[in-house]
Image: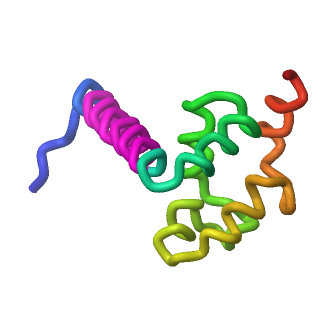
Amino acid sequence: MRKPMSFHGIAEDIRQAEALREGAIARGFAELERHDATLVRLLLENIGDRQRAARWMCMRQRAFDGRTAYDLLAEGDVDTVWDRVTGERELPAPALQVRAAY
């Protein structure tokens, strides 16, 4: 029989999972910079800052059939990501709000 977890243990597990996720987001964006600096510059121009751009790359998008931009890049579908970032397909509302503020 499993020993019940304390809320302290649950909170610690969540903190660890968040730290792993944040690290993966940062490493993924750094790798994207190495592979396609132009795409990164465009993301930064359209979304506003590095953290938001890095998170956007990880967000599941309806326009990508529930996949992330990284999923599309992994499949070799760079054009769909570029279309979305260049405005041929609209960015999500939070990104548009950031762009409008500048």
User: Horizontal and vertical percent for residue 40?
Assistant: 59, 44
Residue at 50% x, 77% y: name it.
Answer: 75
Quadrant where the image shows the N terminus: bottom left
**Which residue is at the front of the view, 83 or 17?**
83
Q: Would you identify the image quadrant in which residue 44 lies? A: top right
Give the side of residue 68 with respect to residue 82, left or right. left
Span shown in magenta: 10-31
Residue 13 falls inside the magenta stretch: yes
Residue found at x 21% / y 38%: 5
Q: Residue at x 53, y 67 (%)?
A: 73
In the picture as drawn, the residue positioned furthest to the right comes out as: 100
Q: Nearer the viewer, residue 96 or 59?
A: 96
Q: Is residue 11 magenta?
A: yes
Quadrant of image for the C terminus = top right
Percent coordinates x, y for residue 79 in the rendering: 68, 71
Q: How many marks?
A: 0
Question: Does residue 98 appear to the left or right of 16 in the view shown?
Answer: right
Apparent side of residue 90 relative to residue 19 in the rendered image (left or right): right
Q: Which x, y percent locates residue 45? A: 73, 35
Q: Quadrant of residue 10?
A: top left
Identify the main secondary structure in magenta.
Answer: helix
Closer to the camera in the image, 73 or 11: 73
Give the image location of residue 67, x and y in percent: 59, 67
